[in-house]
Amino acid sequence: MEVPTATSLKDIYPEDAITTQTKRWQSLLTKFQQVYNRPAEFVARSPGRVNIIGEHIDYSLYEVLPMAITADVLMAVAIVPDKSHFTITNTQDRFPAREFDVPDDGKVEIDASSLEWSNYFKAGLSGASELLKKKGKTGPLAGMQVLVDGTVPAGGGLSSSAAFTCSSALAAMVANGQSSIDKTELCELAITSERAVGVNSGGMDQSASVFSIAGAATYVSFLPSLTATPVKFPDTGTELVFVIAQSFVAADKHTSGPVCYNLRVVECTLAAAVLAKIFALKKGLAKDASPLGTSLRGFHDAYAEQKEGVEDNKKTSIVEFQAQLATLVTLVEDYLPQEEGYTREQIGFILDLSVDELNDKYMSKFPVRTETFKLRQRALHVFNEAGRVLKFRKLLSDPPSDGDLLKELGTLMNDTQDSCRDIYECSCPELDELCQLARSAGSYGSRLTGAGWGGCSVHLVPKEKVEGVKKAWIDKYYRKKFPDMDDAKLEEAIVVSKPGSGSFLFKVT
Ligand code: NG1
Ligand code: MG
């Protein structure tokens, strides 16, 4: 499937957003003319996302269920065909204009050690450059003049970074003469691109951003290859709404963020390696598409093959697969007993590696600072969370009666939150509090969304309870915690979003 070209903003946004978006797009194009003294040729657009369920399991290659939101990143572009010179400006002054050149070999230099907004542009550009080479394009990259306008809050857990990388990758492909862009290719390149900017991320955000279809959540599978399936919510008697609430705790990926996130990726990968060794898997762990090349899902499939004779676990029925996950949970409980975690020496001993070799193999790209690795807890969260996603999907495709459906979906979301808080340790007191307040005011299910440690929370709320939930947050969280917060900022804090559309291209001239 190709990234669609919009002919009207109505193709991209819901009816009630058209007036605001028309003004925003007009002002973007006017500003482009002012900055570059020429009109923009096209706009590349990719949205942020909220994850409904399946947290911190995409990099273990288990299915996840995010949806795109209306907030997005727009890149208005004019092409500079004769030299690889790039100018990128932003409608927001806090992101200063940047200029750079790319050598004729198309290699884009990125200094991931500095927190620099243009890195996300370079990441998308670099991925596009690689893909263009693969497609046989020779010669230097086309230069670009770019003006960016983003409405996804940065560091807010709604994946501004993926929206940014997907837009820049799309823009770079178009600038280099690609008239039709395959969604899977774009998405895969955006996933690897983001890994160049300091985080060993999974592929959920980019998939939601590229593939989403208005009105449906996006069920993302990573095996046997990346696929995204639209999932509609059944028409129940109760109109349900997903409400997103900011904690205003910045999940800063470049201080504690990368340490925490990348550490979780390492812990999951090490758990897979250790389990594979304990169960003496003959074939070992096969190389896969996860950030460090092997995953808990890889262990899962190899275990099913060796111990249960399953030839191709991708074809296993959902019921069977859930039973396998339940078995894996018991295995972890029995065979990874150390609640306090495992030291590098202990893990090295199991894997027949010296500590240096271990560091080299798993922690050289992004070093992680820790004494112990909580293999037991991380693996338990992943296998249980993968099971919850399957249950959630099953409930949607085969719903029980109305009241029960919402309650059951909500319970799964609440269970995710408990697991993120207690077992995966990626929540924070503010997110826990937002969830508690929402539940007391009538939310069926409340949880953090995205990487956690701050950022946003998501809540499944029946429409008639939305006002009550909002009031609880305003009175008991926002006003108390941030007494000086103005109404405009408070306006931003709570978003009621329907599932939005994914990446779009818009030709201006
Ligand atoms: P955030 O940091 O919220 O965009 C991150 C990862 C996802 C996924 C979630 C946790 C990036 C770009 N994204 O999302 O792939 O692992 O955490 O489920 O790092
Ligand atoms: Mg991000």
Image (cartoon, rainbow, N blue to C red):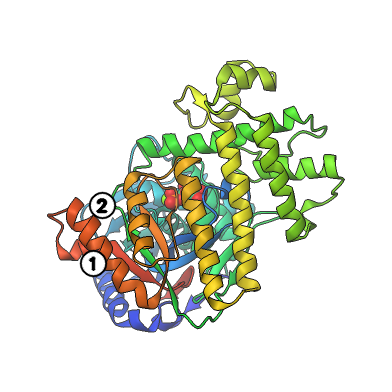
Residue 68 image point, x, y percent: 46, 66
Q: Nearer the viewer, residue 37 or 295?
A: 295
Question: What element does badge 1 sit on?
Answer: helix
Question: What element does badge 2 sit on?
Answer: loop
Identify the residue at image location x=65%, y=66%: 394
Q: Is residue 28 left or right of residue 14?
A: left
Looking at the rendered structure, the kind of residue marked 2 is Phe
Which one is earlier in the sequence, the residue at label 2 or at label 1? 2
Q: Is residue 156 left or right of residue 357?
A: left
In this orientation, does residue 245 appear?
A: yes
Q: Quadrant of the N terminus?
A: bottom right
Tell me the residue that label 2 is attached to. Answer: 95
Badge 1, how many Cα within 10 Å: few under 14, some, many 20+?
A: few
Residue 40 image point, x, y percent: 34, 70
Q: Is residue 294 above or below residue 456?
A: above
Q: Report which quarter residue 231 is drawn in.
A: bottom right
Residue, far left:
484
Q: Report which quarter residue 380 is drawn in.
A: top right
Q: Is residue 366 above or below residue 431?
A: above
Q: Nearer the viewer, residue 165 or 435?
A: 435
Query: How far is mark 2 from mark 1, CA to CA?
Result: 23 Å
Q: Nearer the viewer, residue 186 or 431?
A: 431
Q: Is residue 271 left or right of residue 311?
A: left
Residue 490 image point, x, y percent: 21, 63
Q: Quadrant of the C terminus?
A: bottom left
Q: Is residue 174 above or below residue 455?
A: below
Identify the residue at image location x=63%, y=33%: 271
Label 2 vs label 1, nearer the camera: 1
Looking at the rendered structure, the kind of residue marked 1 is Glu
Q: Nearer the viewer, residue 173 or 3?
A: 3
In this orientation, does residue 77 appear?
A: no
Tell me the residue that label 1 is attached to. Answer: 491
